[in-house]
Image (cartoon, rainbow, N blue to C red):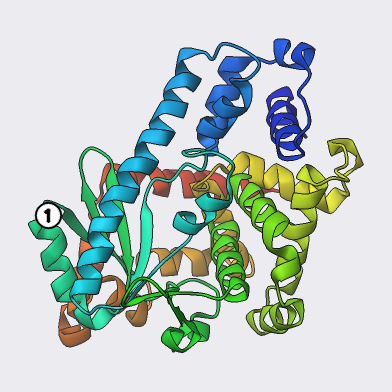
Amino acid sequence: MFSKTHEDIIYLLRYYLQRKPINHDIIAKMNLENLAQFAQFHSLSAMVAMILEDYIELPKELQEAKNQGIRRELLFDHERQKITQWLSRSGIWYMELKGILLKTYYPKLGMREMSDNDILFDESFQKEVKHFFTEEGYSFTYEINVDAYMKKPIFHFEMHRKLIDPLSRIDSDYYDDVKSRLLPDQDRPFAYHFSLEDFYLYQMLHDYKHYSQSGTGIRSLVDLFLFLETEYDNLDWSYIKKELFKLNLTDFEQQQRKLAFKLFGAHAVSLTDLTDDDRNVLSYMLSSGTYGLMENQIINEVNYSNGNQWLYWKERFFPPVKTMQLRFPTLQKHRYLLPLFYLYRLIPTSKRWRNFSLAVCLLSRKKEK
């Protein structure tokens, strides 16, 4: 179930996070090319490079990953400060999310890789925020709960109008009145943050969204371990358990938390000593990578339809009206255009054709079984 590369990356992460010396002989037997590729698949290249640099001369690919990780974090921090200062001056409340905060739990600058920065903001100022970003040279992409802004060479900011995608199969109503859950920053006007407990709950909900759709990689387990290693005794676990029950995440949180500590904690166990459930979950995560796989998404969507492939194809080609209105806001005022947008979705593109072909192949195999 686990390859030599899987075992190598778990070994490096485990011993580093346990602050134990790493065996030079074990490193000498590692295929560093395979390790670098797999680390990149899980957005752990910079971390693996910073672990290995105390033991070997880094290969070019890992040295570049380390340098890029440091450079990206410094540049993003500087650019984000400019954005948040403008939000404060403009009287727009906001909250930094996800990796922006999680990276502070990592031991070294640039160790926690990020492809973007996420910020929740007061959506009543959507037009003003869009004007600011476009004036700064960013391109704009509308998504269901996010306005995405990108500027070459590296900047990508996801400005969240809402915390949860209403089309995801999780309780998006939980954050309907999100502002009531936030605490004001002491030193930054109009900046807010979650309590530690609510930050943990949101992160768990975010991880579950990815895990249950197309999958998520083992970096989320490293995030979880580092956060809990620092904050476990500071958390109100009675509150967390109560809220997890409301979100129907009790089992997922428990499984992820236990697996993270089995892999990286002081009493870690070998991969062969994991339970069958743990091995299945870890195998799924190792094969998914940071951003998941389309194969996982197709199979999971069919499973959510109780294995009904006809229903899957129906919703694939002709999503419900509510779904279309969320994806194409024009339809909220001009519903009569719905047939045109259905036709638009049927126009073949290389991506649509690739995903369609993959779905046909996967579901044909599933039907044969």
* Observer-nearest of 214 and 257: 257
Q: Name the residue under label 1.
A: 136
Q: Which residue: 84% across, 37% down?
A: 271
Q: Which residue: 35% across, 41% down?
A: 74
Disc 1 secondary structure class? loop
Q: In this view, does 19 lie to the left or right of 183?
A: right
Residue at the front extreme? 187
x, y (%) of residue 193? 46, 73
Q: In this view, does 338 lie to the left or right of 39?
A: left
Residue at the right extreme? 273
Q: In this view, does 43 lie to the left or right of 159?
A: right
* Observer-nearest of 238 and 7: 238
Q: Which residue: 49% across, 80% down?
A: 172
Toward which corner of the image does residue 92 lie, by quadrant? Answer: bottom left
x, y (%) of residue 21? 77, 25
Circle 1 residues within 10 Å: few <14, some 14–19, many ≥20: few
x, y (%) of residue 224? 65, 55
Q: Can residue 145 be seen in this view?
A: no
* Observer-nearest of 2 and 325: 2
Q: In this view, does 77 lie to the left or right of 329?
A: right
Q: Which residue: 58% across, 75% down?
A: 198
Q: Amino acid type of disc 1? A: Glu
